[in-house]
Amino acid sequence: MAYGAHPDADATALERLLLTSGILGDQQISVARAAQARTGAPFDEVLVSLGLVSERILRSLLAREWGLPVLDLATTDRDESFIRQWSGQKLLAQHWMPVRRNPDGSVVVATSRPVTPARRALIAAEVEAAVEFGAVSQWDLRQFALSVFRHEIADEAANALSRRSPLLSAKTVLSRGQVAGFVLLGLVAAGAVALWPVRTAEVLIVAMSLAFLAGTVFRYVVAVRGARFDMVERISDAEVGELRDRDLPRYTVLVPLYQDAHVVSRLVPNLARLDYPPEKLEVLFLVEQEDRATQEAIDAARPPANFRVISIPPGEPQTKPRALNVGLFFATGEHLVIFDAQDAPDRDQLKKAVIAFRRGDARLVCVQASLTNFNASENTLTRLSTLESTSWFDYVLAGLEALDLPMPLGGTSNHFRTAALIELGGWDPHNMTEDADLGIRAKALGYQVGLINSATDDEAITSAGVFIKQRTRWLKGYLQTALLHARQPRQLIGKIGLRRFASFAVLVGGTPLAALTVIPLWIAALAILLTPTIELAELFPVGLLWAAFISFVIGNSALVYLAMMGTYKRGQFDIIATAVLYPFYMILMSIAAYRAVVQLFSKPHLWERTVRGRSKIAPDQTAVRTYEVGGL
């Protein structure tokens, strides 16, 4: 809430103040009354969210109504060491905060709610002194808390998970046991190469072939299962239309931004289009403190009154999940969703998520919307990445849900029950795929993840260099997630079962492993095709080489078919021919995989940001997306 709920009498008094002061007229008051009746939101929140009154003016009016002086927390003297005796979250929940102790021993207290005798006595008992109140807004309090508790908030966002559950955090790349295991494996491999170089090469070829085939065939089998069973939560327009604003929960939208000033002018209207009562919607832009350009771009875009900027305190690692943890600290919504800088979600996506949560039980912690690329046809790379993402969202994720297997979340358009997300520990700021890790963690704790028939327009990467950097981060994150959940395999198997553990190992651990095999297998395949058989036979068994070649062809054929499947539900048949190039697309993935391995040990927590807003194609927000029920 912006200021806390007021009884009808308080709302009437506020209306009278607005009218007598000439700030609003009868027509504007009527609009605000209608919005309050429709949504059930506090009258002051309605006024601000509709842009009828600024927070500064409303704060002054509330101070008059409550008989308190206005307190400007940005300029007033404060005693931060005194304030830190209390919990910032507890104080925010109670809508007050101590500011300083006066020379006479009394305490200056900022409040965003009326001061009744009972409340005065309660706060006086808490601070153990007489109190002197000043009126502020709840947003003033939140910003004040961020300033006062900036070091604590930054530390909590970065280290809470690693302190509470060190074995579930990627802060430590390898456990002692894993270090010993890798050292032993390296010594054995070095000895094998020295003593039996040819045999070692043969074993390596077989291992790479099996790893590539296992990864691709597993994904194919899961996708086919997803095509047979429509696991997406189908929510009709009629159901959305039946929702009443009064019955909708408060919703928080978190938008992490870094050096994204160039896309803000498009982002703000994309989010302003969301069909959700502004009185119950808060959009929090999470901007790094030193990123003045993005903050200024947001101001210049003149966002609606319920769009706010949270300045992320400096700290390490400087990653998206750390910023999200700061946002989670300030989120007031019953539900929460993440959108990225380039996203344009369907207008009714939040309402569909609300319906999906109401259909599910308390174990449903997250529902995932799918992604579409508005610039799918821009070039060959955008076509191929679109084929990959559509097959992933439309078939692979559906297959994982149908088989009740752990589901790695996407980094955007995932909607959470906020309380359950907090129970999960939020995001791991040291993990480069914090979304995938959270999905596995949720499954281990008995939660469920679902899919909804809604989409978010995204921007496909247009250049190979940016693509490789993005996939490096993703594959490094998959390696981190696989390694940290492999520290206690028996415990994880006990929680999710052997079948789900095997699925996790093949999908999360096997994806970067399969990508690592692509370049060596391409070299081997070309050698088989271009080198005379007699010469090959002098080095390796020809049958072994041809078996490896056939498995490579089978794996790539499965990938091509998966890519072609990606066009089916969405009718993107204009890019289907590009699927034959998918084996070459995998070479880029392989380059990224080798970069990921190097970075895992040299720069494990380096977040290589994805530069967006470079497409030459403008998104078409009038496009109608279709979702056909599965099948091939």
Image: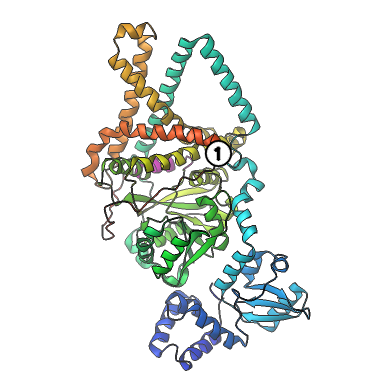
Q: Is residue 105 above or below residue 200?
A: below
Tell me if residue 396 is in the magenta stretch.
yes
Residue at the spot of label 1: 496
**Closer to the camera, 115 or 612?**
612
| Quadrant of image for the C terminus | top left
Range covered by the magenta-colored residues: 394-407
Residue 500 visible (yes or no): no
Residue 182 quadrant: top right
Residue at 25% across, 37% down: 578
Horizontal side of residue 480 vs 131, given as left or right: left
**Closer to the camera, 159 or 499?**
159
Residue at 44% across, 25% down: 211
Tell me if residue 418 is in the magenta stretch.
no
Prevailing secondary structure of the magenta residues: helix
In x, y percent, where is residue 400?
Answer: 43, 40
In x, y percent, where is residue 390?
Answer: 33, 44
Horizontal side of residue 91 vs 337, given as left or right: right
Badge 1 element: helix
In x, y percent, where is residue 564?
Answer: 27, 38
The amino acid marked with disc number 1 is: Ile
Q: Is residue 554 above or below residue 158?
A: above
Q: Is residue 504 above or below residue 214?
A: below
**Closer to the camera, 338 or 378?**
378
- Label 1 packing within 10 angstroms: few (<14), some (14-19), many (20+): some
